[in-house]
Image (cartoon, rainbow, N blue to C red):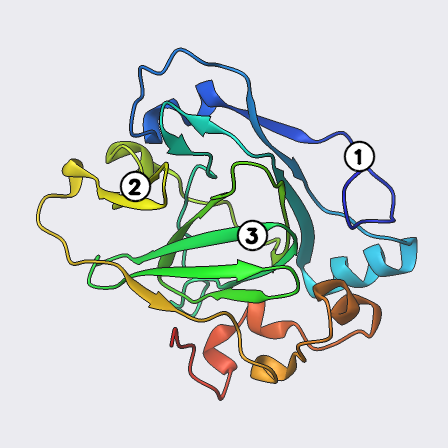
């Protein structure tokens, strides 16, 4: 059973602490248990799945139980997206279904490092050109988040692995600590979750509502055609 999901449930992909070791603040941390669970390519009914296939879009859910790893809050591994055929990197759209998430985004040139705090029902856009890590900053609540993303690419993990994680680690007490592997970088700025009406998405509408209502998701494969500029405010 996945919290906040009433559709079919496949076996999850399990990311363990060992899988995250190269991106941790303390890679020598002795624990090795599961860190989070990824349920990929979900659909409530076959007609929804067929439509998602025609759109070349995937609906996923990630479940991150509360945990600290030698003082660092549990997080996803972190990755960038490649560029499409028109030379624009693929975006991604998230919604928090339960709990609270800190979405730590960083531009490829590291000139912009952003933290977005999102709670249940709030949506977060990862714009083209940004890598991202999601952190569960709660000691007691499970973070459950859904995402819509193009199915046309493979995520790029190597920039995070080569630099031992993101530009900052979030430690117990919600302290962001600079990753020394990045050298001189700027600080973290705060940005808000997706405002009501952005990309035609209403605050009361969940991501799966967009699937059920057959909304236009072409921007996930062709962000260069979007008239509205992707921004993190």
Say whether residue 119 is left or right of residue 206: left
Looking at the image, is mark 1 or mark 3 nearer the viewer?
A: 3
Residue that badge 3 annotates: 100
Residue that badge 1 annotates: 10
Element type where label 2 sits in the image: helix
Label pair 3/2, CB-CB below 8 angstroms:
no
> Dot 3, crowdedness within 10 Å: few (<14), some or many (≥20)?
many
Say whether residue 16 is left or right of residue 216: left
Q: Is residue 138 above or below residue 95?
A: above
Say whether residue 3 is left or right of residue 169: right
Task: Judge by depth and name the residue closer to the eye, 222 or 115.
Answer: 115
The earlier-in-sequence mark between 1 and 2 is 1
Q: Residue at x 68, y 42 (%)?
A: 40
Say whether residue 31 is left or right of residue 3: left
Q: Is residue 110 above or below residue 229?
A: above
Q: Residue at x 72, y 46 (%)?
A: 41
Q: Residue at x 66, y 64 (%)?
A: 121
The earlier-in-sequence mark between 3 and 2 is 3
> Dot 2, crowdedness within 10 Å: few (<14), some or many (≥20)?
some
Q: Position of residue 39 (x, y in %)?
A: 70, 39
Element type where label 1 sits in the image: loop
Q: Position of residue 182 (x, y in %)?
A: 16, 43
């Amino acid at each position: 059973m996945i919290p906040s999901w009433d559709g079919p449930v496949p076996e999850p992909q399990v990311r363990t602490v060992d899988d995250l070791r190269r991106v941790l603040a303390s890679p020598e941390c002795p624990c090795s248990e599961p860190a989070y669970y990824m349920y990929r390519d979900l659909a409530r009914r076959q007609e929804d799945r067929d439509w998602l296939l025609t759109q070349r879009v995937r609906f996923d859910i990630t479940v991150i139980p509360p945990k600290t790893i030698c003082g660092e809050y549990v997080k996803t591994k972190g990755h960038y997206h490649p560029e499409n055929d028109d030379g624009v990197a693929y975006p991604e759209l998230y919604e928090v279904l339960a709990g609270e998430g800190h979405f730590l985004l960083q531009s490829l040139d590291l000139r912009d490092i952003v933290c977005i705090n999102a709670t249940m029902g709030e949506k977060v856009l990862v714009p083209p050109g940004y890598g991202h890590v999601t952190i569960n900053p709660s000691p007691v609540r499970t973070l459950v988040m859904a995402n819509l993303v193009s199915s046309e690419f493979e995520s790029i993990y190597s920039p995070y692995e080569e630099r031992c994680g993101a530009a900052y680690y979030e430690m117990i007490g919600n302290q962001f600590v600079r990753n020394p592997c990045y050298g001189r970088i700027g600080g973290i700025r705060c940005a808000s979750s997706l405002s009501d009406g952005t990309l035609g998405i209403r605050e009361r509408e969940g991501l799966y509502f967009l699937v059920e209502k057959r909304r236009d998701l072409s921007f996930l494969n062709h962000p260069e055609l979007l008239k509205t500029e992707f921004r993190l405010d």
